[in-house]
Image: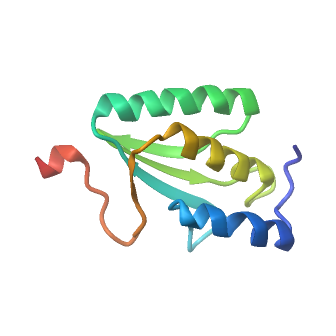
Amino acid sequence: MTNTLLSDTDRATALPALGETGWRAQPDRDALRKIWKFRTFSEAWGFMSRVALACEKANHHPEWTNTFNVVDVVLTTHDCDGLSALDIQLAHKMDKLAGNAQVQTDHSEPVTCLCKTR
């Protein structure tokens, strides 16, 4: 896999399907973002651990944060300063590993973890 920007054709093919699963374009850069809410901190951490192993294998790593049960991820390829095939591949892998976690699709809304809602 090369670290080159996605072509317009590849974007038209890959991005709509990712949008259906909750991935959203970052308005200020060529990147994708997704926010998962797991039932517990342990589930969120387990997801991150499984993703970390896949990332090491692919030598491609997300920008992410974790607050209690919430995992907020941004994918972009720094080598080419934008989206590459590596990001698409990792997005699909993360979707599989997330299981039935809730997805926050409206990124204009504040991200609230369970510790704030209980």
What residue do we see at 48% from left, 41% from top? 98
Q: Is residue 96 left or right of residue 47?
A: right
Q: Is residue 40 above or below residue 23?
A: above
Q: How many marks?
A: 0
Residue 27 spot, x, y in % from top left: 56, 74
What residue do we see at 67% from left, 44% from top? 90
Res. 93 image quadrant: top right
What residue do we see at 48% from left, 33% from top? 48
Q: Is residue 111 left or right of residue 73?
A: left
Residue 96 visible in the picture: yes
Q: Is residue 105 left or right of residue 76?
A: left
Q: Nearer the viewer, residue 28 or 23?
A: 23
Q: Nearer the viewer, residue 68 or 93?
A: 93
Quadrant of the drawing holding the N terminus: top right
> Which residue is outermost to the left?
118
What residue do we see at 71% from left, 53% from top? 88
Q: Is residue 67 left or right of residue 75?
A: left
Res. 13 image quadrant: bottom right
Residue 33 spot, x, y in % from top left: 53, 59
Residue 101 spot, x, y in % from top left: 39, 45
